[in-house]
Image (tube, grey):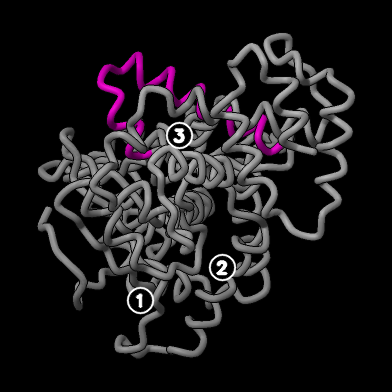
Amino acid sequence: MQKTTLGDNKQCVKSLLQSGIECPFLIPEYQRPYAWTYEQVETLFNDIWDHTILSGDSEKNKYFLGTIVAYINENDEQEIIDGQQRITSLFLLLRAIYEKLQKSDGKRSQHFSKEIRETIWRTDKYTGEVNFGEILIRSEVISKDSNTILQKILETGTADPAATDRYSKNYIFFQELFEKASAKDPLMIYDFIYTLLNKAVLLPIMAVDQENALMIFSTLNDRGMPLSDADIYKAKLYNNQGTKEKKEDFISDWIKLDEDAKGAGESIQQLFYYYMFYLRATENDSSSTTPGARKYYLESTKIKSRLYSPNLMKHLWAILNFWSVVSKQAIFENEPWSTNQDILRALDILTSYPNEFWKYPVIIYYLSHKDKSSFQKRFLLFLQ
C-alpha cells in the first residue's frame, strides 16, 4: 500500500476497506477496547441516512467520516493508531446490512451483497470466491473474549442477544436501525447502502512507522475517542518489551494498574503526572514552569531514563498504593505507615485543602524516603 502524508487522499468506505485484502487491518494490543455507545452508533447511521437524502444523485457531495491513522507493520498489516472505533463500527454496520440482504433475491440485493463481501472478507481475485473465515480486520486488544466475539459476529452474522459486550450490543442495534429504516422507506435502502459504500469517505493517513504515526496522531483533533498520553506511553512501552511473553506480561500488568487506579479515583495518566514531579525533583529541576507530560516523557533527551526506566512500573504501583491508602483506607503489609493513625489523620486533613498542590511534594517525599527505617516518624513530621 502506498504510504502517504496529509493531503487530498480521501477514500470512500468501499475502497478503504477493500485495501484490507492486500493489507488487513489490525487493532493492536495497546489500543483501547471497543467502546462506542448506542448514541454514537445511532449518530453514524442517521448521519449517513440524512446525507443520502440530501445528496440525492450527486456524486460530488461526499460525507466525511474522519481520519484513519495507521502504518504498515512487519506483517504487512495496517496497524491502526487512530480511528479503530470508527472502522470497527463500519465493519459491524456492513455485516448487519449484508445479513439483511441475504434474505432478498433481487438484483440490487445481489449486487450490494457482492460489494459488501469484498469489504469484509478476503476474496480470490481470480475466481471471486469468498473465504468467510478470513476477515479483513483483526483485533488483538487485551479484553476478555472480545476478539473472539468480533470474529464470530463478522463470520456468522449473529450475536448473542443476552451479551453485554459492545460488539454484540452495537451489532444488534445496527440490525434494528437498518430494519426500521427498511420498513419505513424501503425504496431508500439501496441509496443508503450506495452512499455508505461510495459517498461516505475517510482520510487514511499511512505513516512510515509507529513513531511517525503517533506523531501525526498527536497533531490531529479527532472527534472520536482519541488516545490519551497514557495510551501513547503504553504503545511505546509495549514495543520496548522485546519478547512476546514480556509484552503479554506488560499488558496484563498495565490493565491491572488501570483498573486499580480507577478504583482509587485516579488514572494511569495522573500517576504519570505525579511521577513526573518526582523525576523533576531527582533531576534538580527548579523551573517554576510545569512541562507538558507528553513532551516531558517523549520529547526529552532523557527519554530512555524516564519512560523506559526499569523502575517505572514499580514506582507507578507505589504511587497508586499511596493514593489507595489516602482515598480508600487500604492497608498494605509492606507499607506499615498505612495503619499509622497519626499519619492517616494528617493526610485526611490535607485532602480537605481547597487545591491539590500539596499532593506533589507529598509524593516526592514518599517515593524518596518510603524505604528508610525512620520513614514513619519523619513522614509524620513532614506532613505536619
**Between 176 and 170, which is closer to the camera in this rendering?**
170
Front: mark 1 or 3:
3
Disc assigned to residue 45: 2
Of 59 and 33, which appears nearest the observer? 33
Question: Which three-letter amino acid code belongs to the residue tagged 2?
Answer: Phe
Q: Is residue 347 above or below residue 86?
A: above
Residue at left offset 36%, top offset 37%: 307
Percent position of residue 284, x then y: 40, 44
- Disc number at residue 53? none
Badge 1: how crowded within 10 Å, few (<14), some, or many (20+)? Answer: many
The foreground one among 36 and 156 is 36
- Mark 1 belongs to which amino acid? Lys
Q: Is residue 156 left or right of residue 136?
A: right
| Residue that mark 1 sits on | 199
Picture coordinates of residue 290 (x, y %)?
48, 60
Residue 198, picture quadrant? bottom left
Q: Quadrant of residue 131?
A: top left
Inter-mark Cα distance, 2 to 3: 25 Å
Q: Residues within 10 Å of mark 2 (few under 14, many from 20)?
A: some
